Amino acid sequence: MEDLVEELRKSLKQVLVYLQKEDLALIEKAYEYASYAHSYQLRASGEPYLVHCVSVAKNLAELKIDPATITAALLHDILEDTLVTEHELIKEFGEEVVSLVKGVTKLNKYQFQDNITEQAENWRKMLLAVVKDIRVIIIKLADRLHNMRTIKFLAPDKQKSISQESLTLYAPFAHRLGIYKWKSELEDLAFEILHPQQYNTIRTQWQKRAESNTENLKEVEEQLKEKLAGTKFPCRISARPKNLYGIYKKMERQNKPFSAIEDLFGLRIITDTVENCYAILSIINSNFKLVEGSFTDYINLPKSNMYQSLHMTIISDKGVIVETQVRTEEMHSRAEYGIAAHWRYKKRVEAIKSIKEDAKDSVTEDRLDWLKKFLEWQRETTDSKEFLTTLKTECDFEQIFVFTPKKKVIKLPYGATALDFAYAVHSDIGDTCMGAKVNDKMVPIDTKLKTGDVCEILVRKNIKPSKNWLEFAITAQARSRIRRYLREHPKKEI
Ligand code: MN
């Protein structure tokens, strides 16, 4: 057991090489402190409790996050589980670290609830805490990730309820923050617990396909390399598997068997600049056929979580179909680590000086903007189920991009209707929406939109929101506005 802790400590140190000496000293001190404070405590796995603290810190170190967050991660359960007081902790580690630890401790009070009302209330409180300091929820996600990795030591019913919450809320939340790596892992871990049979079937089939597919993929990769070798664009190509839960969802959504899912593997081309992304695109275009309609430019139109890449599905000479992404190193880092990647690309000195300012920094601000709006919209919602479903819709989206007649882009969640679009343009337009013209065709307001549609909303003054609108409005913005109207204008009983 001692060896295990020592090994973990070493591997944490290895990940932390991006930090400077004085930061490492504080982290080292937190390690010793946690080791002492938790010394008699064990995990459900029988391992020393410290294993958990170090693992959470290591998850965060992999995001190359700021030193205060790593220090807080090592100490994150200390106020809750040991006799150490807040006062003592401030004396040793300072206000910033302790406020993070306190934030996480507070979140822990909102433990998982089967009761939907309490669960909604917990999430509402959690989100309010997140708006204050995003790092608190990032520590919480790292904590949840380690708890999910070790979930098999818990009682079966607990495994199920924690997995359910991870799948429906934590994973989407990680997705919304753009931490794709954690999102996929949380999903697959929860998927295994909740649907063991489907999980195992897909995994077995996936492995079989992987073996037979490697050759095809290699061939396309070679072809690509050959075409790019003669150019001056620096790039690296890597293969990219889809996560198992993603495959399962796709099978469900498209009602297809595993054998009909084409894009299990893809290729990713990573280069240095945006210009070179487009240069590589043009090389691909002149050497490969693309599947019609498969090209999406997420560089010009980033997703709300700031994801950027060029997407296309190419067909090789031999007819092999491969989903391909082209992006820069920075986009790649952001795609994998999301909001946390922000710290990676700051200059070292700056990063150390301005951790506090980071919270106010415009990139972070952008990413939290949706959350602030969401909480604003949901302030009056007393319906817990409504709160949780709209939170899920807002987080867990395939996004679509729809244009106004003046070519302004409106981002909407997958499944959004013309009415959602109307509310996204302006709430008054939503309230008086009578129909829409999509790509110059008249359509009813419950029409589902898709990327690339040009949508014009038709309004009429005497139109008022009605209850049945809730059957097809899916965005938080539209739903809260409609509900408010209905509340303020109750139907007169006859
Ligand atoms: Mn913990």
Image (cartoon, rainbow, N blue to C red):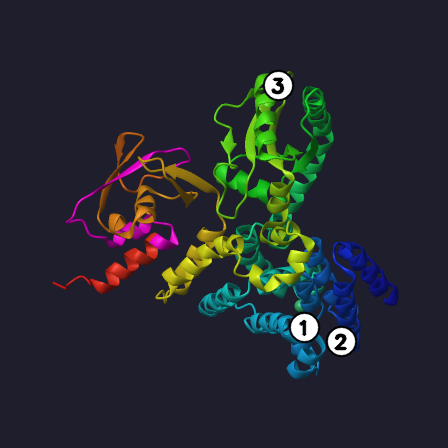
Quadrant containing the C terminus in the rendered view? bottom left
Quadrant of the displayed image that contains ligand 1? bottom right
Mark 2 crowd level (few <14, some 14–19, many ≥20, 10 Å Cα): many
Q: Which residue is mark 1?
A: 77
Residue placed most toward the observer, 297 or 474: 297
Sequence-wise, which precedes: disc 1 or disc 2?
2
Q: Which residue is mark 3?
A: 319
Sequence-wise, which precedes: disc 1 or disc 3?
1
The amino acid on which the numbered mark 3 sits, given as a three-letter code, is Gly
Q: Is mark 1 within 8 Å of ligand 1?
A: yes
The amino acid on which the numbered mark 1 sits, given as a three-letter code, is Asp
Residue placed most toward the observer, 42 or 182: 182
- Say which residue appears at 69% left-offset and 60% top-offset: 146
Residue placed most toward the observer, 314 or 244: 314
Distance from disc 3 to disc 2, alpha carbons, whole Å, reads 59 Å
Residue 34 placement: quadrant: bottom right
Distance from disc 1 to disc 3, alpha carbons, whole Å, reads 54 Å
| Magenta segment | 449-477
Q: Is residue 127 visible?
A: yes
Q: Which residue is mark 2?
A: 38
460 shown above or below 212: below
Asked if labels 3 and 1 touch by Cβ distance under 8 angstroms, the answer is no
The amino acid on which the numbered mark 2 sits, given as a three-letter code, is His
- Say which residue appears at 18% left-offset and 49% top-offset: 463
Q: What is the count of numbered marks?
A: 3
- Say which residue appears at 33% left-offset and 44% top-offset: 421
Position in image of residue 241 (x %, y %): 66, 38
Residue 313 circle label: none
Q: Is residue 65 visible?
A: no
Secondary structure at badge 2 equals: loop
Residue 22 placement: quadrant: bottom right
Q: Residue furthest right?
A: 3
